[in-house]
Image (cartoon, helix red, strand yellow):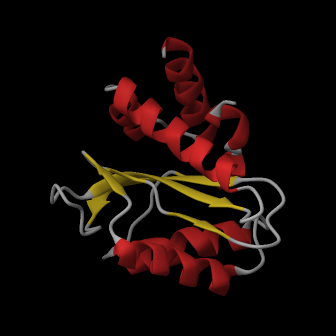
Amino acid sequence: MRLSNIIKEKAIILNLEAGNKQEALEKMISFLKKNQLINHDKEILQKLLQRESLGSTALGEGVAVPHCKVKGIKNPIILLAIAPNGINYETPDGQPVKVFFLLITSPEDPSLNLQILALIAQLVRKSPELKGKILEAQNPDEVLEIIREQEEKI
């Protein structure tokens, strides 16, 4: 399984701006709804905020992976959002988040959720240049190509 096969071009935000964690999540969910990738936006936002209340989903070094499980999701959804100016996300390392991998999966397949979270963590950990390259991307197609290239290397 590869992230580049799951992430869709219409689920990539190149210039996310938000003042805080909740506003960032609201904007990402609104983007997914506007692009008709989800329809239970309020429930998803609530579940994401619930998950964040248990502990930050930030991986550190400017990357976060907010995630939740929602009934009615047939295929996993990954939104990749780039926040060039960084967003205060209450991270353990205190760094603002610049790259988000927001994951929504079905509760019927919890192992798939864990597999995808592990793939994201592995890609971020084993590709030190990933974040920098993504931040320089000019369009969604370029973002996907960067992820493909980095997946090939690991």
Q: Residue at x 33, y 69 (%)?
A: 55
Figure quadrant of the N terminus: top right
Vertical placement of 29 versus 10: above or below? below
Q: Is residue 100 visible?
A: yes
How many numbered circles are shown? 0
**Outermost residue, left side:** 94
Q: Residue at x 57, y 40 (%)?
A: 139
Q: Nearer the viewer, residue 153 or 113?
A: 113
Could you say which quadrant of the image residue 65 lies in? Answer: bottom left
Q: Nearer the viewer, residue 88 or 121?
A: 121
Q: Residue at x 34, y 52 (%)?
A: 98
Image coordinates for residue 2, horizontal then vertical, percent: 66, 30
Image coordinates for residue 49, horizontal then vertical, percent: 46, 79
Vertical placement of 89 versus 1: above or below? below
Vertical placement of 67 versus 99: above or below? below
Could you say which quadrant of the image residue 61 lies in? Answer: top left
Residue 66 relative to residue 12: left or right: left
Vertical placement of 14 versus 126: above or below? below
Q: Residue at x 51, y 78 (%)?
A: 26
Residue 117 relative to residue 44: left or right: left
